[in-house]
Amino acid sequence: MTWTPDQPIVSIHNVKKAFGSLEVLKGVSMDIMKGEVICIIGPSGSGKSTLIRCINALNDIQGGSITVEGQEVHDDNLDRLELRKKVGMVFQQYNLFPHKTALENVMMAPVKVLKQNKAEVETRARELLRKVRLEGKENSYPGELSGGQQQRVAIARSLAMSPDVMLFDEVTAALDPETVKEVLVTIKDLAAEGMTCILVTHEMGFAREVADHIYFTDKGVIVEHGPPETFFDNAQDPRTKEFLSQIL
Amino acid sequence: MSRMIPGLTAPATTDMPVLLPAPTARHTPRALNFSHWLASIPPWVPFLIFTAALLWPMMALAQGTGEGKPTPLEALWRWMPFLITRGFVFTVLISVMTMLFGTVMGVFLGLGQISPVKGIRVASYWITQIFRNSPWLVLLFIVMLSFPFQVTVFGVTIPIPDWTKAVIGLGLPIMANISEIVRGAIASVPSAQWEAAESLAFTRRQTLYQIILPQCIKRMIPPWMNWYAILTMATPIVSILGVEEILNLTRQAIEAENNRPELLVPFYGFVLLIFFVYCYPIARLTIRLERKFALKL
């Protein structure tokens, strides 16, 4: 089966995941179309991060299926490298390579993994750093950058692989309130350009503003989902209501 | 009066049990114990001891009948160039070769300890543990006595000199310790670095060589130097097996001077001093690098 852009770019179907006897995902399904921005919200330990880590096979699953562009992710014969070229990921703790400058961090994967021409990659990397508003920080090491700046380098690093889907795992959770905004602006720009984004976030205002669709998870299941307006103003499930009343 | 901190310097304001910070300095073993100890010696102390060692036989000689014979200092002065150029240079050579052998083998073994293949991982672990925890002298004896003194390959006889066997014998425990340094340094890199590289489509091998190892190579240098200093201090044990390094040549020199007892202390004292002069700067540098690299990270 070949994938065409009118089909979901990421399709998650009845996914089950357990760490030992602890069931984290108890049958989660969602379809994400190309260019959509999805926000997954929910209390801690509800399986949000686990779910998006399953999308690029950082975690394995025990049941169900996940496809990216029609390709089954949890297949023993999966070419993981091919998958990860398509799916970029940004982490809560940035995880930049501390021994490389911002520019080198961005350039490394295209040069070493994709074997692209170094000069061309450098031009593109400088472009990406400008895009995340880090012009002039090319030669700074991660240790010399603020959390917000590091996170934007991490976003640029992921974008350098030209992924079709971007996963954001609580990317602002470790940041100061002042620097949260600069990272969110960057993600908003990306979404506006039509990048498919799947975000796990606690920033409700941001979710409301950029998301096309919100999923609320609790205890390993999707409790409720819908477009931001209906979700935030007209939540149906009591668990959603309780969560929103605590957070908003 | 200083301010009271509830729960720490004053009674707790809560009934809940409070976990006090554990005093770390006392019971945390220092990784570079040997270098710390050696580097902490003021440089003039060994010279003072050496001077005392020179004076002692002279006083002994003044009481005896030593006419016509050179004083111990004169004898030592005459032998010194030979002991240094023939003896100590060879000792250093053995230590360098041993370190080279141990490092190359140890790096492979250390990487083997984190291999994804279970068989390699388990085998590397046990090889490391066995050689790390065996007496050096026993390993040296096994290698020295079990290796042939020559091998014949395609009719060509290649002799295996004693010092080659000494390098292998001493290199085995060094190998095992380097293996542990490599394994520990790799383990000290946060697992998030592996994940980040994985999500960027790096293979395991690429991740290891381009992301993980470059980050921990600095951390390996001080313990590696520490082991070099320990090894250098240990090389005289190869003299037991007849390798003509400094200790053996010193004994021969004393014999050549008719075994005069008053020569023992100055000659062996000189050997001690020469080891100190060589290892002391290494220890100081190790400690300096350790501090420098500890700051960055």
Image (cartoon, coloured by chain):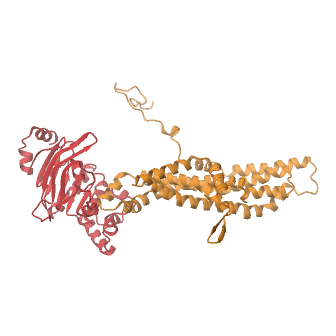
Chain colours: A red, B orange
The residue furthest front is B155
Closest to the observer, A219 or A106: A219
Q: Quadrant of the C terminus of chain A?
A: top left
Quarter occupied by residue B275: bottom right
Task: Report the number of numbered marks.
Answer: 0
Image quadrant where one finds the N terminus of chain A: bottom left
Q: Is residue A208 left or right of residue B48?
A: left
Q: Residue at x 61, y 62 (%)?
A: B97
The residue lying toward the viewer, choosing from B226 and B285, is: B226
Quarter of image, res A167 = bottom left
Residue situated in front as seen by the camera: B130 or B8: B130
Residue that appears at 81% across and 60% down: B77
Residue B137 is at least partly visible in this image: yes
Residue B166 image-quadrant placement: bottom right
Q: What percent of the width, then of the height, locates residue A78?
A: 25, 60
Q: Can residue B295 be seen in the rendering of this structure?
A: no
Q: Image check: B242 left or right of B293?
A: right
Left or right side of B8 for B75: right
* In this rendering, position of residue B220 left or right of residue A16: right
At which x and y percent is residue B102?
A: 56, 58
Residue B216 horizontal/vertical position (percent)? 45, 56
- Measuring from the top left, give residue A125's x and y in whole percent: 29, 68
